[in-house]
Each structure stands twice: as structure tokens, then as C-alpha cells.
Image: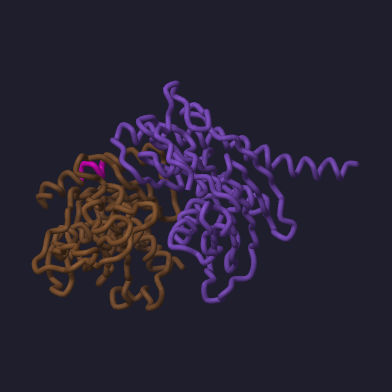
Chain colours: A brown, B purple
Amino acid sequence: MVSVVTRIKQKQIVQLLEKGKRLDGRELTDYRELKIDQGIIERAEGSARVRLGKTEIVVGTKVEMGEPFSDTPNEGVLTVNAELVPLASPKFEAGPPDENSIELARIVDRGIRESKVIDTEKLCIEKGKKVFVVFVDVYVLNHDGNLIDASALAAVAALLNTKMSNYEVEDGEVKLKSGYTQLPVRQHPITVTCAKIGEKLVVDPGLEEEQVMDARLSMAIDDDGDICAIQKGGTGYFTPEQVIEVSKLAKDKAKEMRKKLDW
Amino acid sequence: MNEKPEKLIDKKGLRLDGRKPDELRPVKLEVGVIPNADGSAYIEQGKNRILAGVYGPREVHPKHLALQDRTVLKCRYHMAPFSVQERKSPAPSRREIEISKVIRESLEPSVFMEYYPRTMIDVFIEVLQADGGTRCASITTASLALADAGIPLKDLVVACAAGKADDTIVLDLMDEEDKLGKADVPVALMPGLNGITLLQMDGKLTHEEFETVVNMAIEGCKKIYPMQKEALKAKYMGIKEEAEE
């Protein structure tokens, strides 16, 4: 339910936006402060923590041996899962993944898959029989808005940090050897989310902005500056002109962030 | 699975089913097909066969989900086990849960939610046969089912995808183009309000291509929109004629 407090906040946010301002003093197209730490979980094959303002995400990757899908016998497998853990927000509950966590996982998955981040053919051990399976687990530790961009960044940062075991095939048997090889990562997609509040578009919506927004639009931009995944969410709509505006904003912001991150 | 076609677009610039790049598949719409539902509709688009049924506004279940100032719209998109080549488990997949959410969010902007506080409206979508672009066809038919249920709408929502097959921008992707093509962009539109209520994409497009694709999808929506209106009229003109006899 839209509470009375939210209604008042909505008015305040919209009035501020009319003057080109936001609650926390940011410009309309500014991201909050971004901090990425890699390799924070030693037990995982790869890991990263992203802090975007007060939003905090940890992604851990595990690499295991498994079977390929029948329609892609010579490619490794990528699976993305997201957990909205109950300690991260009063709104999150324990239990099986709900539509929000499934949507988040699928958006992150699409960004990685469609921009072909991992060279999945290099994950094939034995065609049709054995491949490496890469599990990407997104863990939301504090929800302060824009989980999509933070999770997408954390997932790529964790993959960049992921190693897989060396192996050799002897008489059809796969044997692990000592040492590790870096996971073959060749793209670094950056997902940019814009929220529509009234008639204004804001980049990187905070929690309060998300609570009052009409709709959001997320676009994943690859190393070439092309769009490789999009998701609209929320119960409002965008005009065709606003969609194009968001695509331009996404391109610019991704470029800016890519430079900062040196990706 | 059948043999993979080598090319999606032939030398004459035609597609696997002989369509031109900006041509829709044949669309057939029918309203009022489920006697028990408060509103219902059926669509055939290419080989897609999809039913939508609406129940409500009715009592909210479970009760704690009720909202004091508006209705609750619920949506379930579901594929029949026999709707695809390999049997699909009837349990809802992650894909179906996500699509249910985006379809709900594509329909909600069109509904006067505040007219029915403390109630719930259920939209059930069953895909009997899938042929690419099921989420779009589902939205087109679900919006008709809402209208058929007599729920006041700001506009009908109509959806159509566009994308890239080989190096050609194409409208209304069929199964093979969806799976083997280079990009797929489903778009839902409220033509009267000029509002895009669903936008997704996977693949790879430059910004120029993206703009072309979105505009092509919007044109596709605008071609289906009058068919939706015709289908609604057809049912109620039929009832009127019966009454006059």
C-alpha cells in the first residue's frame, strides 16, 4: 500500500525534481558513490562486493564440473541466482525466491549472457559430456535502491576475479591438476537504470525514489557501447521519446563508469 | 529439433515463412471464449495459440494482500506442457514467473486501479502453442479479456516484437528468428496514450538500430490495435443482433 508518508515524500521528491534537485543533493544523472572490492570470499572461486551508496551486494562464484545442455554440447553453463536475504531490508522475507529475486537474477543473467562475457566454448572439457558450470550467486546485503545496477556490476567484478582448476584428460577420465586458470572474460557490460518520476528521468534511483517512481528502465551496455539487454519495470509507462533518451543516458553513463573502473 | 536453417533472410530479402521484413504474421482475435470467466479472449498469431481469462474484481485471497485505495492486479502466464517441441514441465519456471511479472506491469498502467479498492483482479494466460513472441501475443489478448470483463481501461494495451535476423531489422519474430536471430525487442504500447508499458531486449544492437527496432515494433502495435477493437466490437455487435431478433 502507498502509505501517507510515501505520498508526502512523493510530493517532496517531485517538487525537488522540478528544480533539478534530488533528496540527497545529487544531480539527476549522478550515480551514488561506488566502491568495488574483489576477492573478499576466499572459499569462492571468485567474489566481489559492490557498495552503491548504502546498497550493498556480494557476489560469489563457484565453478564445478557438470553436463552441458543438449543443444549446446560444446559450451559451458552459466547460472545466475539472486537472494534477497531477510537481513537486507524489512520488506524481505525468508523463503523460496519470489518474483522480485527471480527478475533480478534474470536481468543480471541476460546482461552477462547477451554480451557474451564468458567464452563458454573454453569451458568445455569433453564435448557433450563434461563442461565447467559457473554459478553466479547474487547476495543482497543492504537494500537502498537500484539493486539491478549494483548486482550487475558485482557479478562482472566477481567473474573477472574467478579462477577455474587446471585439469587433464587421461583415458577418458578427467583429473584435476594443481594450479588455476583465469576464467576467460572478454566483455564488461555495465547496466544503467533510470527511474521515471513524474515527467523526470533520474539515474541510479535510491530506495525512496524507487518507492515513488512510475517506472524504471534498465539497459546493459557492452564494451562497444552497444545495447545488449533491456528491462522495463514498474507500473507506469515511458513515451517513445523517453525510451530513446534513456538509451542515450545509459550509453553516456556506461562510458563514464567504464573509464573510472578501467574495464 | 528440426535442422537449423542456415539463413533467416533469403536472397530476395524474404523470411523463412515468406514474409517481408516489416510484415506481421496473420493475427486472429476472438473475444468471449471462456463461458465461466468474467472476460476472456483468444489469439492466434502465426502458430501461437493463446487464451486469456479474467476473473474479478473479486474478494482478495489471501486477505492480507488487500489494498485500501486500489485493486490488486494478479497475473499468471503459463505454458501448456504440449505447447513446445520438448514437453515442458507444468510447474511454473523462472522464465514464466518473470514473464508473469512483466505482463502484469504492462497491463497495470491501463487499468483504473483506484476504482475497485479492497478487491483483486486475476488475469490467467495459457499458452496452448508457442511460436515466438508469446509474451506480446499474451498481452494483446489479456488486455482484450480485461475489456471484455467490463473493467474500465484508459486504453487497450497491444504488444509486438521487432528485432534483428541476420543483418535485417524485422517485425514480429517467429520462433526460429527469436532463437537464432541477433536481437529481440518486445514492446507493449497504449496507442491512445503514447505509452510504452513493456520493453525488454536481448541480443546486441547499436543505438541507431535500437531506435529503428523500437519504431518498427510501435508500428506493428499500431497495426494490431484496430484488430483488437474489431474483435471487441464483433462480440458485442453479435449480442446486439441477437437481442434485436
In the image: residue A31, left or right of residue B20: left
Q: Is residue A24 above or below residue B133?
A: below
Q: Is residue B198 magenta?
A: no
Residue B2, given in percent of the width and then of the height, sits at 48, 44
Seen from the viewer's position, the closer of residues A24 and B217 is B217
Residue reaching furthest right?
Answer: B245
- Indicate the quadrant where residue B75 lies: bottom right
Q: Which residues are magenta?
A: A249-253
Residue A236, given in percent of the width and then of the height, sits at 44, 51
Q: Is residue A251 magenta?
A: yes
Residue reaching furthest front?
Answer: A171
**Residue A223 visible in this rendered orientation of the protein:** yes
Q: Is residue A29 above or below residue A207?
A: above
Provide the major secondary structure of the magenta segment.
helix
Task: Identify the residue at horizontal 33%, vertical 77% (top origin).
Answer: A86
- Indicate the quadrant where residue B10 lies: top left
**Residue A57 visible in this rendered orientation of the protein:** no
